[in-house]
Amino acid sequence: MLARGAGQRAAEGEVEGRARQETGVAEDAWTRVKRRLRAELGEDVFSSWLARLELDQLADGKAVLSVPTRFLKSWIEAHYLDRILSTYRSEQAGLSGVSVVVRSAFRDPAAASRSSAARPAKTTSGGEPALAAEPSREDRVPAQATPLGARDERSTAELAGAPLDARLTFESFVVGRSNALAQAAAERIARNDGGAAIYNPLYIQAGVGLGKTHLLHAAGNQARAGGRRVIYLTADRFMYGFVASLKAQTSHAFKERLRGIDLLVIDDVQFIQGKTIQQEFGHTLNALIDAGRQVIVAADRPPGDLESLDERVRSRLAGGLVVEIAALDEGLRAGILSQRLAAVQATHPGFEVGPAVVAYVANAVATNGRDLEGAINRLLAHATLTGTNVTLETAEVAIRDLVRNREPRRVRIEDIQKLVATRYNVSRSDILSERRTAAVVKPRQIAMYLSKVLTLRSLPEIGRRFGGRDHTTVLHAVRKIEKLIGGDTALSEEVELLKRMLQD
Ligand code: ADP
Ligand code: MG
């Protein structure tokens, strides 16, 4: 049997493993699918949208993949489901469909499978009727939630924010010199029971993978354990759910709602953009801070560099305590590795990694916590698939790609062209061609614009890379798109999303 059923998962408590297949064959095909998607779509796109996809179940020819947020689920369904299916199919004969569900870390697993059973995921299945063979977990888990109940739960959930991951706590956060201040400030706030807000807002600034999200969840979990009402929002959630839900309320209901929050946590505020949305953001921020409610935010840059935000909002953000998490030093990296290792060993008791290997990985993987976690996962996959112990030699092979990718990747014109082409359903050669139909011209201009703003290439160089065009053509395209963006919110958001997909 390849997959374990939801009932059994519930029984196991679903602590760490989310019913990952130990079966070599299943794990292997999925690992290859991810590797290919990464290679084909580019590192940036992959890490933004697909890196957190996990294989939950493979049964009856259907793969059930999971992601941590509903936003990711709908984005993947809208843009990548067919791609994933076709890639998966070529690696796994007989696969008939792929669906994406939201995995829940904060509810009891039985409730989580109930609600996903009540709302079947969109399934891509070539040839067959779309929902012909839904994941078998539905057969095993009685759907107890009524559809109405599920809907209520959903609209409340929109306002209640995103779930907190129970594994991201202060206990599992390793403290070192580079993050001690941020950790201390977050913990102080989280343990501040009933007192007035301290440093408001707390603004945590750090590059990717340095522990911002971990700290925010830890603070949220801690405050919640202390009986405080916490709302955790990602920028996505803020933009696409929260603001819309707020708008649906009267301003009285909105104020009531705010009064019900003790701690508002917003992650990745650098992604908050759009005129209305940033106004709502400023509005929410002011209302909470003025009412003495605690706010914690995280971003990848200092408040002054949040170009998409209004000057007043920026200075409000800078008005509390701004702390930075610096690059993780080698000792801290070793600490995080040991911590991750211990967590993995709780579910994989046979998995042994000696101190020499830990020291080697800590030295070799200098980037961030995400890559350290990736390294542990690779070692685990290697050990599980080959049934051998991890040695320095095997470790070196298993983490080779992480070591090689030490340099942050810059956006490449080729990736821009590919992404824009996929997005607008044209081919990359259409973009490079002489064709002048509207269906091709606009994506081409958008791609040129993105090449100008996201890379350091000169206009003549960009022209060359777009089928040998003149630099004035590029300049024209850049100006045209700039102008369109100024007056067209939908296009501006579209372009922002593309930028984001290419960048982070
Ligand atoms: P960010 O939000 O800054 O991009 P994350 O909080 O998502 O980074 O961290 C990336 C990964 O590294 C997570 O799995 C996180 O648990 C882990 N991590 C980062 N810093 C630490 C730390 N100090 N202790 C333990 N784990 C950490
Ligand atoms: Mg984060």
Image: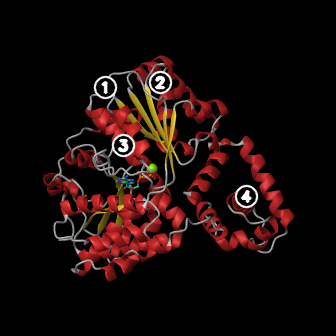
Instruction: Report the Cα–Cα distance between label 2 and label 4.
Output: 38 Å
79 left or right, relative to 163: right
Looking at the rendered structure, the kind of residue marked 4 is Tyr
Q: Is mark 1 within 8 Å of ligand 1?
A: no
Give the residue at x 32% y 67%. Answer: 376
Which numbered tag is attached to residue 75?
none
Instruction: Report the Cα–Cα distance between label 2 and label 3.
Output: 27 Å
Secondary structure of the residue carrying numbered label 3: helix
Image coordinates of residue 309 in percent, x first then y, are 63, 38
Q: Are marks 2 and 1 in contact (CB under 8 Å)?
A: no
Secondary structure of the residue carrying numbered label 2: loop
283 left or right, relative to 344: right
Q: Are marks 4 and 1 in contact (CB under 8 Å)?
A: no
Disc 3 or 4, which lies upstream in sequence? 3
Q: Nearer the viewer, mark 1 or mark 3?
A: 1
Secondary structure of the residue carrying numbered label 4: helix
Residue to which mark 1 is pinned: 193
286 left or right, relative to 16: right
Q: Is residue 124 visible?
A: no
> Where is the N terminus found, in terms of image quarters?
bottom left
Instruction: Report the Cα–Cα distance between label 4 and label 1.
Output: 50 Å
Which numbered tag is attached to residue 449?
4
Q: Is mark 3 within 8 Å of ligand 1?
A: yes
Disc 4 or 1, which lies upstream in sequence? 1
Residue to which mark 2 is pinned: 249
Q: Nearer the viewer, mark 3 or mark 4?
A: 3
Q: Nearer the viewer, mark 4 or mark 1?
A: 1
Give the residue at x 48% y 61%. Answer: 47
